[in-house]
Amino acid sequence: MAKEGGTGGDGRRSVTVRATSLLNAFDTEHRALNLSQLSRRSGLPLATVHRLAADLVESRLLVRRLDGRYEIGALLWRLGRLAPPTELRELALPHLQDVVVTTGHTVHLAVLEGTRALVIERLAGTKTVPTRHSPGDDVPLYCTAVGKALLAYADPALIDRVAGELSPHTAYTITSPAVLHRQLDEIRRTGLARSAQEHRLGVSSLAVPVHGHDGVVAALGLLAPLRAPRLADALPHLRAASASVSADFLRSGLAVASSGADGSRNASG
Amino acid sequence: MAKEGGTGGDGRRSVTVRATSLLNAFDTEHRALNLSQLSRRSGLPLATVHRLAADLVESRLLVRRLDGRYEIGALLWRLGRLAPPTELRELALPHLQDVVVTTGHTVHLAVLEGTRALVIERLAGTKTVPTRHSPGDDVPLYCTAVGKALLAYADPALIDRVAGELSPHTAYTITSPAVLHRQLDEIRRTGLARSAQEHRLGVSSLAVPVHGHDGVVAALGLLAPLRAPRLADALPHLRAASASVSADFLRSGLAVASSGADGSRNASG
DNA sequence: ACACACTTTCCGTGTAGCGGAAACCCGCAC
DNA sequence: GTGCGGGTTTCCGCTACACGGAAAGTGTGT
């Protein structure tokens, strides 16, 4: 009978979770999916997907095109705009632009989301670097500057969890938990995070935390080609922008929304 | 068998639809809701909301704050970015900026969504007008310039439906279906839609359609104080922007409904 | 003509969603 | 202290609703 013993994985969950797994089948490379693709990518039986997707279309979370493919509906877009990242993004935007024009480097704004850093805005500078992270993408916490800036101020439990699985992206990626911890200490001391080719070859970056009422709510990062001349000169501008964003953030009375860990599941008792 | 008869719009439907009605309880003024508010605003029993919201949190569509209130989660934000409006918005953005700097007026980009026009981007000009529609808001189709521009090229059935319920917003709002139809004819002939105080007093606007492969995919509108001097001078810029957006749109290969095969093959894996 | 891939419908099974009611919690007033 | 009012969480029996295998329907390429 009970073939399901696994914790956490997928398998048999509530309708809502299943419906969400349908939504999760979409990503930047797959903005429109037909029924079979949806079934394959979500791992749900075809008949189930057929019914579920129809429900989602009725709810206007998805729309069905004339060619039969599904895509994310405008309702979802609109709802998504109500999420905390939107407010932060819009309030930070002018300051990000300042940084871009004064330094010429590409700037990232990211928040902690689960065990990754979610890039909520990216403004390309004139001194372009090949890497392409659009808003909506997420990057690892341990091998990017914004990631480390966020991680350094995160819940110690999260730090340990992340430090437990340091899979290398390049030859420069930190794979030793001890080294990572040492770096995080330094970040906390100096308020500055760095990464040099740890995530992508040829790219180095700086990042500083953005402070909220209690704790760090975001990180502001700067991307540059590996040996960009006087990248450090940009630091004051980055710090200034961070301070401005912090100030605006506090003024706006927004609350931290970072989800944190799941924790309580069906534990015994 | 007979379809269900409820006219109210909600009521007794599938789980998915109910869950969505929870999501719909959120709006710009209500970005964070506690359980009871959620229950009240969605019309669902409290116990049901309690369970459903927990599911949504587990799915990460919602997050629950430390103070017990729910808000839209980052996952939803990210999914929303995969919706068509995002692509259109980003591709149109530079052209919108052109219009703003050359004309100084506030510009709107809107798409058809149900029986309303969804504003997907708004750039404020130097010649500000009091009205405030942020991206994500929707406006009526029959009393705004962008709305009319979209309506004029929409499915006749939709036109009739909209013409059936012309509730006035100001003393200038068109309430006669015949007048509306006549205006729509003219819009189709001239490619230009206007509204003068029909939606908000003191505001007049122009709008032009943005064409896709077959049909209109968006509208580009310009807001100005009532008797803005030489507002018509801005029209060429607006048309030029519309043409540029159209061109970029077509180039990008975005589809509203592609009937033929589009190149992408899916290598299963 | 056949083969193949995708989509839609059907329908018997039983599970999972339902939601009223009661308990619980906390701050407040008296 | 006791009672009151708001919100939140848990309980639990009933059955409506979701489930999904299987089969029929549709369209394209060969």
Image (cartoon, coloured by chain):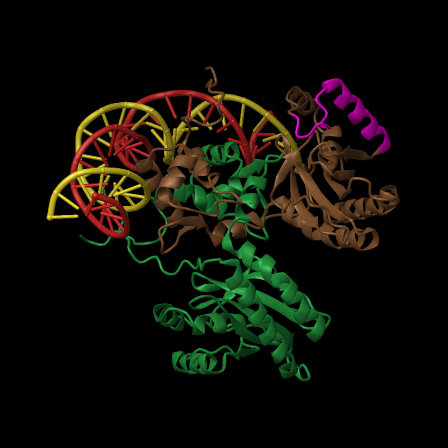
Chain colours: A green, B brown, C red, D yellow
Rendered position, A77 above or below B152: below
Residue B94 placement: quadrant? bottom right
Please tell me which residue is depicted at 39% across the width and 78% down the height of the picture. Answer: A177
Rendered position, A69 above or below A198: above
Please tell me which residue is depicted at 51% across the width and 43% down the height of the picture. Answer: B27
Q: Residue B130, can we see it? A: yes
Q: Is the stretch drawn in magenta largely helix, strand or loop?
A: helix
Residue bounds of the magenta highlight: B168-190
Rendered position, B158 above or below A222: above
Q: Is residue A172 left or right of residue B212?
A: left
Q: Where is the N terminus of chain A found, in terms of image quarters?
A: top left
Q: Residue B159 placed where, x, y %?
A: 69, 24
Q: Residue B259 placed where, x, y %?
A: 69, 35
Q: In this view, does A2 lie to the left or right of B239?
A: left
Pick whichever, D4 or D30, lies toward us.
D4
Pick whichever, D2 or B225, lies toward us.
D2
